[in-house]
Image: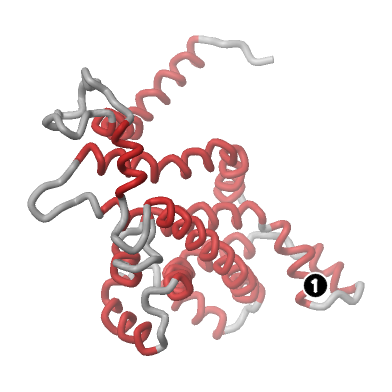
Amino acid sequence: MHRYTRWSAFREVGLWIGALPILFPLYLIINVALQPATEPTGSGLHPPPNATLHNFSQAWGQAGSGTVSFAGALVNSLLTTGGTVLLLVLTAAPAGYVIARRASKLSGLLFGLFSLGLILPFQLAIIPLYDFMVRVGLDGTRTGLILIYTALSMPLAIFLYTGFLRGMPEAYEEAARVDGAKPLRVFVEIVFPQAAPITGVVAVLSGLLVWNDFFTALVFVGNSDRETLPVAVYSFVGRFSTQWPLVFAAAAIALAPVLVFYGFTQRWITRGFASTLHG
């Protein structure tokens, strides 16, 4: 049993100090969200004297364009994020496995091309990509948005899977091949379960990217019934005036699912990152 020492207290204080830059923006969001929309918006540093929860109900009812409600945008974000993570794992995991296990020039070239995708800005291809999506009829659709997000997340996912699988021993795979298992069965029953830590990392990173992304969703599904939460929150930002308490209330609602998700899966996520760093 570990004793609580001065060093333990020092570490806890250090962790709280390190957490302040992260907790402070959250504090500002909640403070401004609780301010009455009819009163001048303060700095957010002090708790509002007339705090109200009305902004949250108003944001829930009014956010979004005329084609989708806030609840609809929430569902769109959940389906888009879930669909992207699922498709990404189903494609990046076997691709990373092939690149990791095939010691050939082609595998090295493919890995280099995917790594190049980590540094090339997506905005360079936004116009031809939008033109292509219009031509194939996928603009303004959830399917098209999922495909775009999957492609954007693919370089990082393959980079992580390849690095992790290259460091994983091949003894179990060789034993399965000796017993007559085919490559697909070896991957599904042996390799993929052992790659669970990196799968968790890929799912978290890509999920956060999709959930928080504003620009891509605005371009491809803006003003449609497939709007996601960031675009719905933006509906409160006007050309001549902005209702900041409603904006922050909507942002707090959009942030809640992420915090709840992390609260239930923090141990699994932490183990995934730790296994990746030490693996």
| Rendered-image quadrant of the N terminus | top right
How is the rendered protein coloured? secondary structure
Q: Position of residue 55 (x, y in %)?
A: 29, 35
Q: Secondary structure at mark 1?
A: helix
**Residue 262, above or below 71:** above
Q: Position of residue 156 (x, y in %)?
A: 47, 64
- At a point 75% along the width and 65% down the height, the residue shown is 170
User: Viewer-proximal residue, 15 or 221?
Assistant: 221
Outermost residue on the bottom side: it is 135
Q: Is residue 197 left or right of residue 207?
A: right
Could you tell me the amino acid type at mark 1? Arg
The answer to whether residue 155 is seen in the rendering is no
**Horizontal relation, residue 174 to residue 49: left or right:** right
Callout 1 crowding tier (Cα within 10 Å): few <14, some 14–19, many ≥20 = some
Q: Residue at x 82, y 70 (%)?
A: 174
Give the residue displayed 24% in from the left and 32% down from the top.
32
User: Circle 1 sits on which residue?
Assistant: 185
The picture quadrant where one finds residue 178 is bottom right
Q: Position of residue 217 (x, y in %)?
A: 34, 65
**Image quadrant where residue 151 sits:** bottom left
| Left or right relative to 162: residue 248 | left
Where residue 112 appears, as percent x and y from the top left, is 46, 76
Residue found at x 39% / y 23% = 16
